[in-house]
Image (spheres, rainbow, N blue to C red):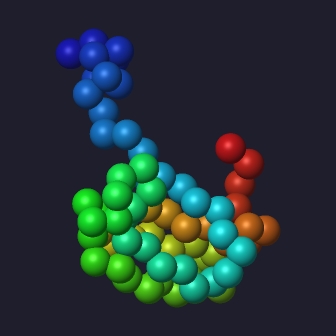
């Protein structure tokens, strides 16, 4: 399989949200209606990591100015 064909079949990277608090809530909504998302979960970041990922939708929340906050 060619490299370009592999890239076309690759799974897209998860969504990344930059946030200002160490505790966030995720219900999988965003571009979809909340009813089409997943149960709301509350997530807390470890201070030394500076990010947390949702176990349902793999959305990543990154603390602004934290250790995982890198320019796009």
What quarter of the picture does the C terminus occupy? top right
Q: Is residue 24 visible?
A: yes
> Which sits in the foreground, 1 or 60?
60
Residue drawn at (65%, 62%) of the image: 18
Image x and y of residue 32, in percent? 36, 53
Look at the picture and state if 59 lies above or below 53. above
Image x and y of residue 31, in percent? 42, 50
- Which quarter of the picture shows residue 16? bottom right
Q: Is residue 24 left or right of residue 71?
A: left
Q: Is residue 67 left or right of residue 30?
A: right
- Residue, far right: 65
Look at the picture and state if 24 lies above or below 31. below
Image x and y of residue 47, in percent? 65, 85
- Which quarter of the picture shows residue 17? bottom right
Residue drawn at (49%, 63%) of the image: 60
Image x and y of residue 30, in percent? 45, 56
Residue drawn at (50%, 74%) of the image: 52
Look at the picture and state if 17 lies above or below 11. below
Count of numbered marks: 0
Q: Is residue 67 visible?
A: no
Q: Is residue 1 left or right of residue 17?
A: left
Look at the picture and state if 1 lies above or below 61. above
Residue drawn at (21%, 16%) of the image: 1
């Amino acid at each position: 399989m060619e490299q370009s064909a592999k890239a076309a079949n690759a799974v897209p990277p998860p969504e990344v949200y930059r946030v200002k608090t160490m505790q966030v809530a995720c219900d999988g909504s965003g571009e979809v209606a909340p009813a089409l998302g997943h149960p709301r979960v509350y997530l807390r970041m470890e201070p030394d990591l500076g990010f947390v990922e949702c176990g349902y939708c793999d959305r990543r929340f990154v603390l602004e100015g934290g250790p995982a906050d890198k320019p796009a």
